[in-house]
């Protein structure tokens, strides 16, 4: 293995090492971000649960304080009941009931009965001293109310009275809206009977919502639904976290890094073992040497793509492809690699070009019983072509007519001796407009005619035939002008 190969192997090993470090670091970082995201969501849930629990504890504490004040009066309830409503700004009404449910005292109305959030029978059989009702709408204030039912006991432990305190939940709703409604997450709260205490979406979405679903869509946005419950009372909290596609991004990123690492590892093994690499067949040869030979040389890999083409090959196929590297061999030679027999022998064939036929040979490159690619050599008969050009130039020089060839840029490309005698010094590359504007005008007019046109050059007392020339694709390539002396006109059969 030469020095260049050793440097390439070391570079590939370094790339694999650093890419492995990046992959491992990336996986650990994504795992850390995932845990961070989960902790963030757990913190949001815990804050909402704590706020809801704090709301319950507050109203329970107010109720316990009220019954303690009543029990301390030992039967004189009137004065205490009037001051209970001042204990908390959320209190909207206070009731005192007998164990049978009849109203003894009511802060708002003493004559009309009201609908309780809990039946009296359930209150009496509850083990807790303070029981919290479901949410309902108060018929007097028309506010959403939650009530606490507190048992006032006699000295013997039996129920003496039942104290009902109504609390409005408007402040709780506002706090939940302020803290848990944003672009990334939202919250919905239902009581133990399934009544929506707080719902962040429209009424139509509430009807569509199922409490068992884990995905929710609103305005073309997807939310992940997570359910939590409070202990007492068992209110249900549903958290709607906006879908951030983190798992998809994490999976795609890891797969991308792993794929890149796989490709580098594969290339490293190829460089170490010399497997499936056509360049290993020529590891001690400088490809630049092949630019000095007259034949076209093309080397392809196992997939049929050109990995090297010398200067002559580029000149041969200049009209077909401006660059040959990394294109498929069949794009310029056809399916020549498909005609090999089972023994993988070299195949000779004739290559048809627009103006000539070329001989070529294609041979597979085999090393240690494995095909690594192919080598194609195209023979260019430079000597024969040069001889034809010499003969043609000699013929043009000895004919009695003047011959001028003007290329597609309207510049003189070639002119024989007689043409120089007739028109003067015709320098190669000179514009025909400078030599004779009248002749140039005739040439321009006859470019697209496709026919030979005879005109007269009165300035030189000459006649000439103008013949446009086209390539194989029918594109204008130039004009051939033949000059005749009118004193000795040509004879036409």
Image (cartoon, rainbow, N blue to C red):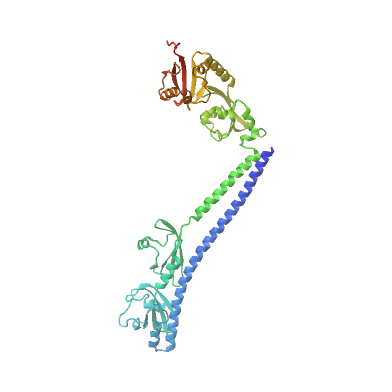
Which quadrant is the N terminus positioned in?
top right
| Quadrant in which residue 29 is drawn | bottom right
Residue 449 to residue 368: above or below: above
Residue 225 seen by the camera: no
Give percent across and percent down for residue 299: 59, 31
The front one of 361 and 125 is 361
Give percent across and percent down for residue 93: 37, 79
Residue 168 to residue 439: above or below: below
Number of numbered tags placed on the structure image: 0
Give percent across and percent down for residue 161: 39, 84
Q: Is residue 443 left or right of residue 417?
A: left
The front one of 294 and 349 is 294
Residue 92 to residue 423: above or below: below
The front one of 361 and 138 is 361
Which quadrant is the C terminus positioned in?
top left
Residue at x 62%, y 46% (from the top left corner): 15
Farthest front residue?
459
Residue at x 30%, y 82% (from the top left corner): 111
Give percent across and percent down for residue 391: 55, 16
Residue at x 62%, y 49% (from the top left corner): 18
| Quadrant in which residue 284 is drawn | top right
Residue 64 seen by the camera: yes
Q: Is residue 181 left or right of residue 271?
A: left
| Quadrant in which residue 2 is drawn | top right
The front one of 410 and 9 is 410
Residue 415 to residue 22: above or below: above
Farthest left residue?
111
């Amino acid at each position: 293995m030469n020095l260049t190969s050793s440097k390439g192997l070391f570079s590939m090993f370094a790339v694999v090492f650093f890419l492995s470090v990046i992959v491992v670091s990336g996986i650990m970082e994504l795992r850390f971000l995932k845990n961070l995201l989960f902790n963030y969501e757990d913190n949001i849930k815990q804050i909402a649960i704590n706020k809801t629990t704090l709301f319950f504890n507050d109203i329970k504490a107010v109720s316990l304080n009220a019954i303690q004040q009543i029990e301390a009066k030992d039967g004189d309830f009137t004065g205490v009941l009037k001051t209970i409503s001042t204990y908390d700004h959320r209190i909207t009404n206070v009731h005192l009931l007998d164990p049978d449910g009849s109203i003894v005292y009511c802060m708002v109305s003493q004559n009309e009965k009201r609908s309780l959030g809990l039946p009296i029978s359930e209150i009496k059989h509850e083990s807790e001293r303070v029981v919290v009702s479901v949410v309902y709408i108060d018929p007097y204030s028309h506010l959403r109310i939650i009530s606490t039912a507190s048992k006032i006991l006699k000295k013997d432990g039996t129920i003496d009275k039942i104290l009902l305190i109504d609390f409005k939940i408007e402040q709780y709703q506002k706090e939940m809206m302020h803290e848990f409604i944003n672009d990334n997450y939202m919250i919905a709260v239902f009581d133990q009977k399934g009544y929506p205490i707080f719902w962040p979406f429209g009424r139509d979405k509430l009807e569509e919502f199922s409490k068992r679903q884990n995905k929710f869509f609103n305005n073309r946005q997807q939310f992940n639904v997570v359910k939590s419950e409070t202990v007492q009372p068992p209110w249900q909290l549903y958290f709607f976290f906006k879908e951030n596609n983190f798992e998809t991004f994490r999976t795609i990123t890891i797969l991308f890094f792993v794929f890149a690492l796989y490709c580098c590892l594969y290339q490293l093994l190829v460089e170490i073992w010399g497997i499936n690499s056509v360049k290993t067949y020529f590891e001690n040869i400088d490809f630049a040497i092949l630019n000095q030979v007259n034949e076209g040389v093309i080397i392809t890999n196992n997939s049929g793509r050109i990995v090297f083409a010398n200067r002559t090959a580029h000149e041969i196929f200049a009209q077909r492809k401006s660059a040959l590297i990394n294109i498929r061999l069949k794009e310029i030679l056809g399916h020549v690699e498909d005609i090999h027999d089972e023994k993988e022998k070299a195949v000779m064939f004739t290559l048809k070009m627009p103006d000539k036929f070329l001989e070529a040979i294609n041979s597979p490159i085999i090393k240690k019983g494995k095909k690594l690619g192919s080598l194609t050599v195209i023979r260019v008969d430079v000597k024969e072509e040069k001889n034809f050009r010499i003969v043609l130039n000699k013929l043009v020089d000895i004919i009695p007519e003047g011959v001028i060839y003007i290329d597609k840029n309207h510049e003189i490309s070639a002119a024989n001796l007689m043409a120089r005698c007739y028109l003067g010094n015709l320098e190669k590359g000179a514009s025909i407009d400078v030599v004779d504007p009248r002749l140039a005008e005739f040439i321009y007019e006859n470019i697209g005619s496709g026919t030979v046109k005879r005109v007269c050059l009165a300035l030189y007392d000459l006649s000439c035939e103008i013949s446009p020339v086209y390539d194989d694709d029918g594109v204008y390539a130039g004009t051939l002008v033949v000059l005749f002396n009118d004193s000795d006109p040509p004879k036409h059969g």
